[in-house]
Amino acid sequence: MSNSNPQPALEIIGRNPLQGTVKISGAKNSALAIMAGTLLCADDCRLSNMPSLADINTMGQVLASLGVKIKKIGSNWEFNPRDLKAIKAPYELVSQLRASFFVIGPILTRLGVAQVPLPGGCAIGSRPVELHVRGLQAMGANVTIEHGVVNASVKGSSGRLKGANIFLDYPSVGATETIMMAATLADGETVIENAAKEPEIVDLANFCNSMGAKISGAGTDSIVIKGVERLHSTDYQIIPDRIEAGTFLVAGAITHSEIFVTSVNHDHLIPVIAKLSEIGCKVIQEDENTLRTLPGELKASDIETLPHPGFPTDMQAQFMALLTISEGNSLVTETVFENRLRHVAELKRMGANIKVKGNSAHVVGVSMLSGAPVMATDLRASAALVLAGLAANGKTIVQGLQHLDRGYENLEQKLQGLGAKIQRLSDYQS
Ligand code: EPZ
């Protein structure tokens, strides 16, 4: 049955070895939080190594709607939040990008009042924000939720949040970032216990400290923030995207190719490199910021996603694609999000042997996948389907590219640069 309206799609001819070097872009999940962080300071900030992604552009629209003036020159962005006046982020943008909820902390701590629509759920889960809200309330904010909008205001005449001791029931990345940013301008000291330890938390803390904030302990489960009166202008470079880097390492492993992945931070990829080695693809550090894949026989391995430094949930789908052609039985358990196994159905269309039970997938390796038309359901699932297409026998068509373009900059060009037979069709009609 042909679909009525043509869609953009990626056409991949599989079983083509890769070679050469791919350069990794700046980290999406760091850039999104740091863009919210530019609201903390009345002076202008300049960010470099910004990735060119749909999500980044959406966050730029959210900031512009709040009165921030933005200039972009290539991967360098300049933010001038002097005229930050609107306290309400627009629903139509927040509903597209849940990370835009991160503006609530900076707006509240700078202006004493903030109204941010509740970010909707998304394909991978309900995505609640009660840990963010409870943290702000602990710092003295009045928070009500009416008609889908979180209304936050600072109690008392001081207009300033108060430092507080906050224990997070779950090491939520977003909640850690919201509370850490709000605390930079609070009156007194804030301690976040059971904080998230992801590299993007450290990058956000380093960015805030470059503006004069006093944050220590980022990257550990206890972060201390001493509030200051105001922050100042800064120039800051975003860290490399460890998930994009991990995705390319898997591309090398799944096509049995030796490739070089450059502009990476090896320390951010330790759980990914360890797991690849266990499966049979060694990854060696070629130089300061370049990794090399040494492909080998792929063997089954179990994966359980966990908060950092455990195995990252954002790499689960990509590794599942790899495990579909790894000899033996693998058990993949997703513990971070409640609905992040939606790529299984599409991988099975390509001949994968996978059974899902609850939040676990039991993968039995097959000798070969076969190319097929498949539909992406979320960002990392789309990456998994591209990887499967690189390994499959024949042609794979991946649709649902709006998911892919949220988080991967020029993916097909980068893969073409490695010799992959992949092209973007502007109007595919199934
Ligand atoms: C960030 O999402 C990332 N997004 C996600 O990347 C990543 O998967 C996730 O961290 C985990 O590493 C950005 O940084 C923009 P969480 P976030 O708060 O902050 C529950 C990608 O593919 N939770 O650590 O939303 C939540 O429902 C994206 O690039 C609460 O219950 O992640 C989830 O089950 C996907 N209450 C778990 O915690 C809360 O108040 C982890 O969420 C907050 C979270």
Image (spheres, rainbow, N blue to C red):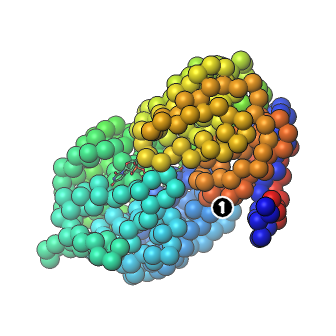
Residue shown at the point (78%, 45%) measured from the top left: 372
Q: Is mark 1 on a helix, strand or loop?
A: helix
Horizontally, residue 410 falls left or right of residue 27, namely right
> Residue 100 in the image: x percent, y percent?
46, 65
Query: Which residue is outermost to the left?
Result: 156
In the rendered image, which quarter contains the N terminus?
Answer: bottom right
- Disc 1 marks a residue whose amino acid type is Gln
Say above or below: 95 vs 384: below
Between 242 and 125, the residue placed more toward the observer is 125
Between 5 and 251, the residue placed more toward the observer is 5
Residue shown at the point (31%, 44%) measured from the top left: 170
Horizontally, residue 18 falls left or right of residue 172, namely right
Between 376 and 17, the residue placed more toward the observer is 376
- Quadrant position of residue 116: bottom left
Say above or below: 180 vs 318: below
Say above or below: 72 vs 364: below
* Residue named by callout 1: 402
> Residue 415 in the image: x percent, y percent?
78, 44
Residue shown at the point (48%, 48%) measured from the top left: 339
| Whether residue 366 can be seen here | yes
> Residue 295 in the image: x percent, y percent?
73, 22
